[in-house]
Amino acid sequence: MNLRYLLWFLGSLLLSLGLYAFMNRGKKGLLSECLLIGVLGAALGAVGAKLFYYLAMIDFMVMNGWLRSLTDLTMGTFSYYGGVAGFCLGVILSARFTCQKPVALLDAFAPAGLLLAALARFGEFMLEGVGIRDMLYWEHPEHCFFPLAVSNEYGEWLYAVFMLEGLLTLGVFALCLARFRQHRFLRSLFYLCLIQILCESLRSDSFTWLFVKVEQLLCMLAVAGVLLVYCLKTPGVRHRWLPFLYCFPAAGVFVVLEFVFNGKIPFHHGIGYGIMVACLIALSVNEVWAFRRMMARQ
Protein backbone atom coordinates (compact mmCIF):
# COMPACT_ATOMS: atom_id res chain seq x y z
CA MET A 1 0.00 0.00 0.00
CA ASN A 2 1.20 3.49 -0.83
CA LEU A 3 1.62 5.18 2.56
CA ARG A 4 1.78 8.66 1.03
CA TYR A 5 -1.58 8.19 -0.67
CA LEU A 6 -3.13 6.78 2.51
CA LEU A 7 -2.00 9.82 4.48
CA TRP A 8 -3.25 12.10 1.68
CA PHE A 9 -6.66 10.41 1.78
CA LEU A 10 -6.91 10.65 5.56
CA GLY A 11 -6.04 14.35 5.39
CA SER A 12 -8.63 14.82 2.63
CA LEU A 13 -11.22 13.01 4.73
CA LEU A 14 -10.55 15.31 7.69
CA LEU A 15 -10.86 18.33 5.42
CA SER A 16 -14.18 17.14 3.98
CA LEU A 17 -15.52 16.37 7.46
CA GLY A 18 -14.42 19.83 8.53
CA LEU A 19 -16.38 21.33 5.65
CA TYR A 20 -19.44 19.28 6.60
CA ALA A 21 -19.13 20.39 10.24
CA PHE A 22 -18.79 24.05 9.16
CA MET A 23 -21.83 23.87 6.88
CA ASN A 24 -23.92 22.23 9.62
CA ARG A 25 -22.54 24.07 12.65
CA GLY A 26 -24.95 24.19 15.54
CA LYS A 27 -26.41 20.76 14.74
CA LYS A 28 -26.84 18.60 17.83
CA GLY A 29 -24.40 15.69 18.09
CA LEU A 30 -22.32 16.96 15.16
CA LEU A 31 -18.95 15.73 16.47
CA SER A 32 -20.08 12.15 17.02
CA GLU A 33 -21.86 12.21 13.64
CA CYS A 34 -18.67 13.32 11.86
CA LEU A 35 -16.69 10.62 13.63
CA LEU A 36 -19.24 7.98 12.64
CA ILE A 37 -19.29 9.10 9.00
CA GLY A 38 -15.50 9.18 8.86
CA VAL A 39 -14.99 5.71 10.35
CA LEU A 40 -17.84 3.93 8.57
CA GLY A 41 -17.27 5.76 5.29
CA ALA A 42 -13.54 5.02 5.20
CA ALA A 43 -13.96 1.38 6.24
CA LEU A 44 -16.82 0.57 3.87
CA GLY A 45 -15.20 2.65 1.13
CA ALA A 46 -12.08 0.48 1.32
CA VAL A 47 -14.14 -2.71 1.30
CA GLY A 48 -16.29 -1.49 -1.60
CA ALA A 49 -13.24 -0.42 -3.60
CA LYS A 50 -11.64 -3.84 -3.23
CA LEU A 51 -14.81 -5.86 -3.88
CA PHE A 52 -15.79 -3.89 -6.98
CA TYR A 53 -12.30 -4.31 -8.44
CA TYR A 54 -12.41 -8.01 -7.59
CA LEU A 55 -15.74 -8.52 -9.38
CA ALA A 56 -14.73 -6.42 -12.39
CA MET A 57 -11.43 -8.29 -12.75
CA ILE A 58 -12.58 -11.64 -11.42
CA ASP A 59 -10.85 -13.74 -14.09
CA PHE A 60 -7.49 -12.13 -13.33
CA MET A 61 -8.07 -12.16 -9.57
CA VAL A 62 -8.99 -15.85 -9.46
CA MET A 63 -6.02 -16.72 -11.65
CA ASN A 64 -3.84 -14.78 -9.21
CA GLY A 65 -5.37 -16.64 -6.25
CA TRP A 66 -8.68 -15.39 -4.82
CA LEU A 67 -7.46 -15.04 -1.22
CA ARG A 68 -4.17 -13.48 -2.24
CA SER A 69 -6.01 -11.05 -4.50
CA LEU A 70 -8.45 -10.00 -1.77
CA THR A 71 -5.62 -9.29 0.65
CA ASP A 72 -3.45 -7.50 -1.92
CA LEU A 73 -3.16 -3.88 -0.71
CA THR A 74 -1.60 -2.54 -3.90
CA MET A 75 -3.47 0.71 -4.59
CA GLY A 76 -4.00 -0.23 -8.24
CA THR A 77 -6.26 -3.10 -7.11
CA PHE A 78 -8.91 -0.80 -5.64
CA SER A 79 -11.75 0.80 -7.58
CA TYR A 80 -12.53 4.50 -7.15
CA TYR A 81 -16.22 3.88 -7.88
CA GLY A 82 -16.49 1.00 -5.45
CA GLY A 83 -14.95 3.33 -2.88
CA VAL A 84 -17.55 6.02 -3.61
CA ALA A 85 -20.39 3.48 -3.29
CA GLY A 86 -18.94 2.11 -0.04
CA PHE A 87 -18.55 5.59 1.42
CA CYS A 88 -22.17 6.41 0.54
CA LEU A 89 -23.23 3.22 2.32
CA GLY A 90 -21.24 4.42 5.33
CA VAL A 91 -23.20 7.70 5.32
CA ILE A 92 -26.49 5.76 5.09
CA LEU A 93 -25.54 3.59 8.07
CA SER A 94 -24.48 6.69 9.98
CA ALA A 95 -27.96 8.11 9.39
CA ARG A 96 -29.50 4.92 10.74
CA PHE A 97 -27.34 4.97 13.86
CA THR A 98 -28.16 8.64 14.53
CA CYS A 99 -31.90 8.26 13.80
CA GLN A 100 -31.88 10.44 10.69
CA LYS A 101 -33.33 9.95 7.23
CA PRO A 102 -30.57 8.49 5.00
CA VAL A 103 -31.52 10.67 2.01
CA ALA A 104 -31.42 13.81 4.16
CA LEU A 105 -27.93 13.01 5.43
CA LEU A 106 -26.73 12.11 1.93
CA ASP A 107 -28.02 15.48 0.70
CA ALA A 108 -26.33 17.31 3.57
CA PHE A 109 -23.01 15.53 3.05
CA ALA A 110 -23.00 15.86 -0.77
CA PRO A 111 -20.73 18.97 -0.99
CA ALA A 112 -18.22 17.49 1.45
CA GLY A 113 -18.35 14.19 -0.41
CA LEU A 114 -17.59 15.90 -3.71
CA LEU A 115 -14.61 17.66 -2.15
CA LEU A 116 -13.32 14.32 -0.89
CA ALA A 117 -13.86 12.75 -4.33
CA ALA A 118 -11.87 15.54 -6.02
CA LEU A 119 -9.00 15.34 -3.53
CA ALA A 120 -8.88 11.55 -3.88
CA ARG A 121 -8.43 12.02 -7.62
CA PHE A 122 -5.64 14.57 -7.18
CA GLY A 123 -3.93 12.10 -4.84
CA GLU A 124 -3.50 9.67 -7.73
CA PHE A 125 -0.39 11.71 -8.50
CA MET A 126 1.27 9.47 -5.89
CA LEU A 127 0.13 6.25 -7.57
CA GLU A 128 2.27 5.47 -10.58
CA GLY A 129 0.33 4.13 -13.54
CA VAL A 130 -3.07 5.20 -12.17
CA GLY A 131 -5.23 7.82 -13.87
CA ILE A 132 -3.02 8.28 -16.92
CA ARG A 133 -3.18 8.13 -20.71
CA ASP A 134 -0.35 6.94 -22.93
CA MET A 135 1.48 9.69 -24.78
CA LEU A 136 3.87 9.60 -27.71
CA TYR A 137 6.15 11.97 -25.81
CA TRP A 138 8.71 12.18 -28.59
CA GLU A 139 5.97 13.52 -30.89
CA HIS A 140 4.51 15.94 -28.32
CA PRO A 141 7.41 17.39 -26.30
CA GLU A 142 5.39 20.57 -25.77
CA HIS A 143 2.92 18.54 -23.65
CA CYS A 144 5.56 17.19 -21.29
CA PHE A 145 4.89 19.28 -18.20
CA PHE A 146 2.87 18.97 -15.01
CA PRO A 147 -0.12 19.20 -14.51
CA LEU A 148 -0.86 18.21 -18.11
CA ALA A 149 1.40 15.17 -17.87
CA VAL A 150 3.52 13.19 -15.41
CA SER A 151 6.65 11.12 -15.93
CA ASN A 152 7.19 7.55 -14.76
CA GLU A 153 10.31 5.85 -13.45
CA TYR A 154 11.58 5.37 -17.00
CA GLY A 155 11.32 9.05 -17.83
CA GLU A 156 8.32 8.51 -20.10
CA TRP A 157 5.65 11.21 -20.04
CA LEU A 158 1.99 10.25 -19.66
CA TYR A 159 -1.08 12.47 -19.77
CA ALA A 160 -2.37 13.15 -16.23
CA VAL A 161 -6.05 12.31 -16.68
CA PHE A 162 -6.45 12.25 -12.90
CA MET A 163 -5.83 16.00 -12.83
CA LEU A 164 -8.66 16.58 -15.29
CA GLU A 165 -10.89 14.31 -13.20
CA GLY A 166 -10.05 16.22 -10.04
CA LEU A 167 -10.65 19.61 -11.66
CA LEU A 168 -13.97 18.55 -13.17
CA THR A 169 -15.06 17.11 -9.81
CA LEU A 170 -14.18 20.42 -8.18
CA GLY A 171 -16.41 22.02 -10.81
CA VAL A 172 -19.28 19.75 -9.72
CA PHE A 173 -18.48 20.66 -6.10
CA ALA A 174 -18.79 24.38 -6.94
CA LEU A 175 -22.02 23.70 -8.85
CA CYS A 176 -23.41 21.82 -5.88
CA LEU A 177 -22.66 24.70 -3.51
CA ALA A 178 -23.95 27.40 -5.84
CA ARG A 179 -26.97 25.81 -7.55
CA PHE A 180 -28.13 22.60 -5.89
CA ARG A 181 -30.64 23.40 -3.16
CA GLN A 182 -32.77 20.25 -3.24
CA HIS A 183 -31.92 16.62 -3.96
CA ARG A 184 -28.24 17.49 -3.70
CA PHE A 185 -27.09 13.89 -3.56
CA LEU A 186 -28.94 12.76 -6.70
CA ARG A 187 -27.84 15.78 -8.71
CA SER A 188 -24.26 15.53 -7.50
CA LEU A 189 -24.18 11.83 -8.37
CA PHE A 190 -25.50 12.57 -11.85
CA TYR A 191 -22.84 15.14 -12.70
CA LEU A 192 -20.02 13.25 -10.97
CA CYS A 193 -20.77 10.21 -13.14
CA LEU A 194 -21.44 12.31 -16.24
CA ILE A 195 -17.94 13.82 -16.31
CA GLN A 196 -16.41 10.41 -15.70
CA ILE A 197 -17.86 9.05 -18.96
CA LEU A 198 -15.38 11.30 -20.77
CA CYS A 199 -12.53 10.77 -18.32
CA GLU A 200 -12.82 6.98 -18.37
CA SER A 201 -12.61 7.12 -22.15
CA LEU A 202 -9.34 9.04 -21.85
CA ARG A 203 -7.70 6.74 -19.30
CA SER A 204 -5.34 3.99 -20.43
CA ASP A 205 -5.59 2.07 -17.16
CA SER A 206 -9.34 1.43 -17.14
CA PHE A 207 -10.17 -2.26 -16.83
CA THR A 208 -12.34 -3.72 -19.56
CA TRP A 209 -14.58 -6.64 -20.43
CA LEU A 210 -13.87 -7.33 -24.11
CA PHE A 211 -13.95 -3.76 -25.48
CA VAL A 212 -16.28 -2.37 -22.77
CA LYS A 213 -14.76 -0.13 -20.12
CA VAL A 214 -16.48 -1.37 -16.98
CA GLU A 215 -16.36 1.85 -14.97
CA GLN A 216 -17.49 3.95 -17.94
CA LEU A 217 -20.49 1.65 -18.32
CA LEU A 218 -21.19 1.95 -14.59
CA CYS A 219 -21.18 5.75 -14.86
CA MET A 220 -23.64 5.68 -17.77
CA LEU A 221 -25.93 3.36 -15.81
CA ALA A 222 -25.79 5.75 -12.83
CA VAL A 223 -26.65 8.72 -15.08
CA ALA A 224 -29.61 6.80 -16.52
CA GLY A 225 -30.62 5.67 -13.03
CA VAL A 226 -30.86 9.23 -11.73
CA LEU A 227 -33.01 10.24 -14.70
CA LEU A 228 -35.19 7.18 -14.11
CA VAL A 229 -35.77 8.35 -10.53
CA TYR A 230 -36.85 11.74 -11.86
CA CYS A 231 -39.30 10.05 -14.23
CA LEU A 232 -40.73 7.86 -11.48
CA LYS A 233 -41.40 10.98 -9.42
CA THR A 234 -43.35 12.71 -12.22
CA PRO A 235 -46.48 10.57 -12.69
CA GLY A 236 -49.16 11.77 -15.06
CA VAL A 237 -47.02 14.16 -17.11
CA ARG A 238 -46.85 14.08 -20.86
CA HIS A 239 -43.85 12.16 -22.27
CA ARG A 240 -43.05 10.99 -18.76
CA TRP A 241 -40.19 8.67 -19.71
CA LEU A 242 -38.45 10.84 -22.31
CA PRO A 243 -35.55 12.00 -20.07
CA PHE A 244 -34.69 8.37 -19.37
CA LEU A 245 -35.18 7.22 -22.96
CA TYR A 246 -32.80 9.92 -24.22
CA CYS A 247 -30.02 7.97 -22.49
CA PHE A 248 -30.23 5.13 -25.01
CA PRO A 249 -29.19 7.04 -28.16
CA ALA A 250 -26.49 8.79 -26.13
CA ALA A 251 -25.18 5.44 -24.92
CA GLY A 252 -25.22 4.18 -28.51
CA VAL A 253 -23.08 7.15 -29.59
CA PHE A 254 -20.63 6.45 -26.77
CA VAL A 255 -20.32 2.80 -27.82
CA VAL A 256 -19.57 3.76 -31.43
CA LEU A 257 -17.04 6.35 -30.26
CA GLU A 258 -15.21 3.77 -28.15
CA PHE A 259 -14.80 1.68 -31.32
CA VAL A 260 -13.35 4.79 -32.94
CA PHE A 261 -10.92 5.44 -30.09
CA ASN A 262 -9.81 1.79 -30.11
CA GLY A 263 -8.94 2.07 -33.81
CA LYS A 264 -11.70 -0.26 -35.01
CA ILE A 265 -13.43 2.53 -36.97
CA PRO A 266 -11.32 5.09 -38.86
CA PHE A 267 -12.31 8.54 -37.65
CA HIS A 268 -10.52 11.62 -36.30
CA HIS A 269 -10.23 11.27 -32.53
CA GLY A 270 -10.47 15.00 -31.92
CA ILE A 271 -13.83 15.16 -33.68
CA GLY A 272 -14.91 12.03 -31.82
CA TYR A 273 -14.20 13.61 -28.42
CA GLY A 274 -16.02 16.75 -29.58
CA ILE A 275 -19.08 14.62 -30.32
CA MET A 276 -18.77 12.96 -26.91
CA VAL A 277 -18.62 16.32 -25.12
CA ALA A 278 -21.67 17.51 -27.11
CA CYS A 279 -23.59 14.40 -26.00
CA LEU A 280 -22.60 15.00 -22.38
CA ILE A 281 -23.82 18.60 -22.61
CA ALA A 282 -27.10 17.35 -24.09
CA LEU A 283 -27.48 14.91 -21.19
CA SER A 284 -26.88 17.72 -18.70
CA VAL A 285 -29.57 19.83 -20.39
CA ASN A 286 -31.82 16.77 -20.22
CA GLU A 287 -31.16 16.50 -16.48
CA VAL A 288 -32.05 20.15 -15.85
CA TRP A 289 -35.31 19.75 -17.79
CA ALA A 290 -36.22 16.50 -16.00
CA PHE A 291 -35.35 17.94 -12.58
CA ARG A 292 -37.42 21.10 -13.09
CA ARG A 293 -40.33 19.02 -14.33
CA MET A 294 -40.09 16.81 -11.24
CA MET A 295 -39.96 19.79 -8.86
CA ALA A 296 -42.97 21.34 -10.57
CA ARG A 297 -44.98 18.23 -9.61
CA GLN A 298 -44.02 18.41 -5.93
Image: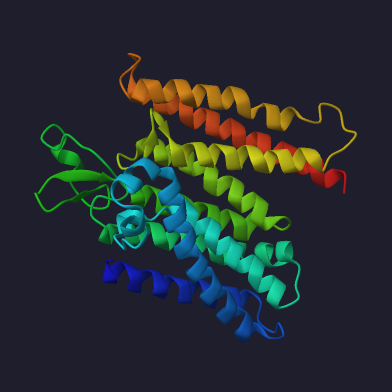
Q: Residue at x 67, y 43 (%)?
A: 226
* Left or right: 139 as drawn, with respect to 80: left
Relative image position of residue 28 (x, y in whole percent): 72, 85
x, y percent for residue 264: 33, 17
**Identity of the residue drawn at 20% across and 37% down:** 135
Task: Identify which residue, 148 or 10, lies in the foreground.
Answer: 10
The colour scheme of the drawn protein is rainbow
Residue 104's place in the image compared with 26, above or below, is above
Residue furthest to the right in view is 236
Horizontally, residue 271 falls left or right of residue 30, namely: left
Q: Residue at x 34, y 63 (%)?
A: 71
In percent of width and height, residue 225 lies at 66, 41
186 is higher (above) or lower (below) than 231:
below
- Name the quadrant of the N terminus: bottom left
Tell me if residue 193 can be seen.
yes
Who's the residue at 35% across and 58% down the image? 67
Is residue 290 left or right of 201 when viewed as pictured?
right
Residue 38's spot in the image, x, y percent?
A: 53, 75
